[in-house]
Image (spheres, coloured by chain):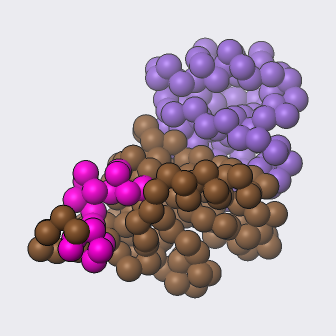
Chain colours: A brown, B purple
Amino acid sequence: MNYALLVLASPFSGTGSLTAARFAEAALGRGHHIARVFFLDQGVGAGMATAVSPQGEADPVARWADLAARHDLELVLCVSSALKRGLLDDTEAARYEREAHTVHPAFEIGGLGLLVEATAQADRVVTFGGSA
Amino acid sequence: MVLHTVNCPPSHPALGQCLRLLAPGDALLLLGDGVYAALAGSRAAAELAASGAALHVLDVDARAAGVLERLADGVSVCDDEGFVALTERYPRQQAWY
């Protein structure tokens, strides 16, 4: 089946973002296709290239990037959620005249239309909620 | 036939909101701090059992919370593959958070 994932959970607190990454891996392992993973609100932290996880703690950014590299996953950060948190790719950094780009290259920045498109085309939509 | 997921502790309004809609034929998967609702003898576990829905906890989260050894009767433990299998079986998911 074709899956779309929506990740609202922050990678920096709680378990939601890592649960979503493990779910994606398990779904691919069962032969499903993941059309797109869309990160919204606090979920966009998953694409923060400059985040450094303490030694011995899980590194959600690396986990997602590794998953994307191995399975050619499309990881999209909501543009407004990302920009207000200082998450900018090359294009946005140039557009807003910021000195650094902070989005991991495994991720792209996009609009909510990409979420709508993915959910419209998917057989299954699974949401990983924000709190806790 | 809805798969509900709850990732908040029983003290959070999300569980009560879920309980209002949870019906026989549905399934509930408790994730994150949501696994505390599956503690044997707790009010939340009794309310969930009364819903008639199939009850599951995610193994990693239940183990991390120390709930795995004290699960209420009738709650089954599922791994990540089991989570995916639930989404295969239940076409729609309602996430409470």
Whether residue B42 is visible: no
x then y, percent, for residue A93: 22, 71
Q: Give the residue drawn at x 58%, y 23%.
A: B15
Disc count in the image? 0
> Relative to residue A55, is residue A113 drawn left or right?
right
Q: Residue at x 72, y 20 (%)?
A: B21
Residue A19 lies, with reference to residue B42, above or below; the image says: below
Instruction: In the rendered view, tell whether residue A44 sits above or below residue B51.
Output: below
| Quadrant position of residue B18 | top right
Q: Residue furthest bottom?
A: A70
Question: Residue B22: percent from the left, percent from the top?
Answer: 74, 23
Query: Taking A1 as reference, is B14 above or below it?
Result: above
Quarter assignment of residue A130? top left
Quarter of the image that includes the N terminus of chain A: bottom right
Tell me residue B35's x, y (percent).
57, 37
Does A91 lie within the magenta span?
yes
Between A52 and A6, the one lying in front of the other is: A6
Is the magenta region chiefly helix, strand or loop? helix
Q: Where's the C terminus of chain A, which quadrant? A: top left
Task: Let me know if residue A115 is in the magenta part.
Answer: no
Camera-nearest residue between A114 and A87: A114
Q: Is residue B97 visible?
A: yes
| Residue at the image position 56 percent from the left and 59 percent from the top | A114
Q: Residue B80 at x, y = what percent?
A: 67, 59
Q: Which residues are magenta?
A: A78-94
Residue at left 73%, top 70%?
Answer: A33
Q: Which residue is farthest front?
A: A95
- Residue B18 falls left or right of residue A13: right
